[in-house]
Amino acid sequence: MKREVPKLVIRRGQPFRLQLHCNRPYNIEKDALSLVFAVADVEKPSFGHGTLIAVMLKNKSTDLGRSYEWGASVNAINGDILEILIKPPATALVTQWKLDIDSKILNGTVSKSYSLPSPFYCLFNPWCREDQVYLEGESKRMFFMNFSIKNCINFAQMKKLVMNTF
């Protein structure tokens, strides 16, 4: 029996951690990372339509930007493992996203890019005050969550099922 690789599911406006295993220790003084997010099923993503987003990695975990913008920062460095904190905005598109990580040594000419092997899902967040679906009270949030799960969470006006439910 083939085991399915779990998919990353995040919520708008809620930071999440991502561990990067580097080929050497990350050096805040010499290295630069940027994250490029693109809507997975858009043929030509663009900045103007909000389907392509570029974010520079900041060095302080307290600096994730405003609630309406993507943010990313260094959360911890442990040898060659770099933990970053990523915050999608409360207004992010609810869809599948691809992520590319671009790295460069400052003042150097060589850069490398890595693409996550599978897209991640960004969902509405009834716990986030800035999200349009924010709900006051835990009972309303639980009803929303149960309704969403029972109805198989469809995106793009119910055109295509994008997330398995168990």
Image (cartoon, rainbow, N blue to C red):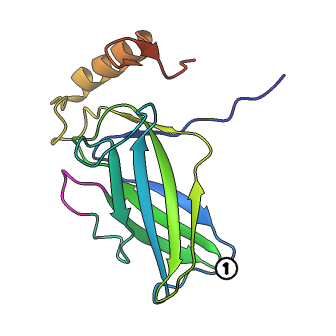
What residue sits 84% from the left and 22% below the top?
1
Relative image position of residue 84 (x, y in whole percent):
47, 64
What residue sits 43% from the left and 71% below the top?
74
What residue sits 62% from the left and 81% below the top?
25
Eyeballing the image, is 22 above or below 12?
Answer: below
Eyeballing the image, is 133 above or below 78?
Answer: above
**52 drawn magenta:** no
Q: Quadrant of the C terminus?
A: top right
Outermost residue toward the right in this view: 1
Relative image position of residue 78 (x, y in whole percent):
60, 76
Eyeballing the image, is 24 above or below 38?
Answer: below
- Callout 1, which amino acid? Arg
Give the residue number, with chain letter if any, for mark 1: 24
What residue sits 53% from the left and 18% below the top?
165
Question: Hey, which quadrant is residue 2 in on the image?
Answer: top right
Question: Hey, which quadrant is residue 69 in on the image?
Answer: bottom left
Q: Is residue 5 left or right of residue 57?
A: right
Q: Is residue 113 left or right of residue 67?
A: right
Q: Is residue 3 left or right of residue 136?
A: right
The residue segment tinted magenta is 65-70
Relative image position of residue 3 (x, y in whole percent):
76, 29
**68 drawn magenta:** yes
Q: Is residue 144 left or right of residue 154?
A: left
Number of numbered discs on residues: 1
Relative image position of residue 75 (x, y in whole percent):
44, 70
